[in-house]
Image (cartoon, rainbow, N blue to C red):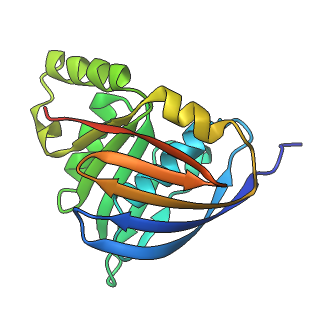
């Protein structure tokens, strides 16, 4: 019998200065039994980085071809399609082609992985990935966030000029959001 997903509740006071977002985000994220806490945190950070009306978590690891974070318009059209972790460049280009009107983004678990992705995309001649926003979080920040496996998490997150500032349980954390363009 398969293990069930673990549900995590996040209450996030989000301030994304550059995007003009100031709001409380309540997010319920199901963590697949084989999903690491680092990957769950990547999904949460991507959700906040890319926040807009209609944003939601994708189906997760149980449906690997689906986005990790998605937003739809009121008519059901996909307006945001985002992956986290280690996507395949060729597969991502196919998804970018299928979702031509959507904002496409990837949040990586390290700048090194983002560089490797970019090198593979360039070597494969995948020019259409140039419209995909690429960003990476520092591994020590992810490790610190994932160090406590709580199911109810309250935090404040401020994003200013590609830098993340977090406060959780009286502890302050921060780190850069590295960007790369193809």
Q: Residue at x 31, y 61 (%)?
A: 80
Asked whether, in this view, residue 171 is left or right of residue 48, the answer is right
Q: Position of residue 161 (x, y in %)?
A: 23, 50
Residue 143 or residue 101, whichever sits in front: 143
Residue 37: image location, x then y, percent: 65, 39
Give above or below for 142 relative to 77: above
Q: Can you tell which quarter of the image residue 18 is in? A: bottom left
Q: Is residue 42 left or right of residue 18?
A: right
Residue at the location (39% across, 58% down)? Answer: 158
Would you place residue 11 above or below residue 172 in this image? below
Instruction: Specify whether residue 137 is in view.
Output: yes
Using the rendered view, name the quadrant where residue 132 is placed. top left
Instruction: Please name the residue shown 33% across and 42% down the image.
Output: 106
Q: Residue at x 42, y 51 (%)?
A: 46
Point out residue 168 in the picture as x, y percentages from the top left corner.
Answer: 61, 54
**Relative to the observer, which residue lies in front, 124 or 131?**
131
The residue sitting at the bottom extreme is 74
Residue 111, given in percent of the width and then of the height, sits at 34, 25
Among the 4 quarters of the image, the one containing residue 84: top left
């Amino acid at each position: 019998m398969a293990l069930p997903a673990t549900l995590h509740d996040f209450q996030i006071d989000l301030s994304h200065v550059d995007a003009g977002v100031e709001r409380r985000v309540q997010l319920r994220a199901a963590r697949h039994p084989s999903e690491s806490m680092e990957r769950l945190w990547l999904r949460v950070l991507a959700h906040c980085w890319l926040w807009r009306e209609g944003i939601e978590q994708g189906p997760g690891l149980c449906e690997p071809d689906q986005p990790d974070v998605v937003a739809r318009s009121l008519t059901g059209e996909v307006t945001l399609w985002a992956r986290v972790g280690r996507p395949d460049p060729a597969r991502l280009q196919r998804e970018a082609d299928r979702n031509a009107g959507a904002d496409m983004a990837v949040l990586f678990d390290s700048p090194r992985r983002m560089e490797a992705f970019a090198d593979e995309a360039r070597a494969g001649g995948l020019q259409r990935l140039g419209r995909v926003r690429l960003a990476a979080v520092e591994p020590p920040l992810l490790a610190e966030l994932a160090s406590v496996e709580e199911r109810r998490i309250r935090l404040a997150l401020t994003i200013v000029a590609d830098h993340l500032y977090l406060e959780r349980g009286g502890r302050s954390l921060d780190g850069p959001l590295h960007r790369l363009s193809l």
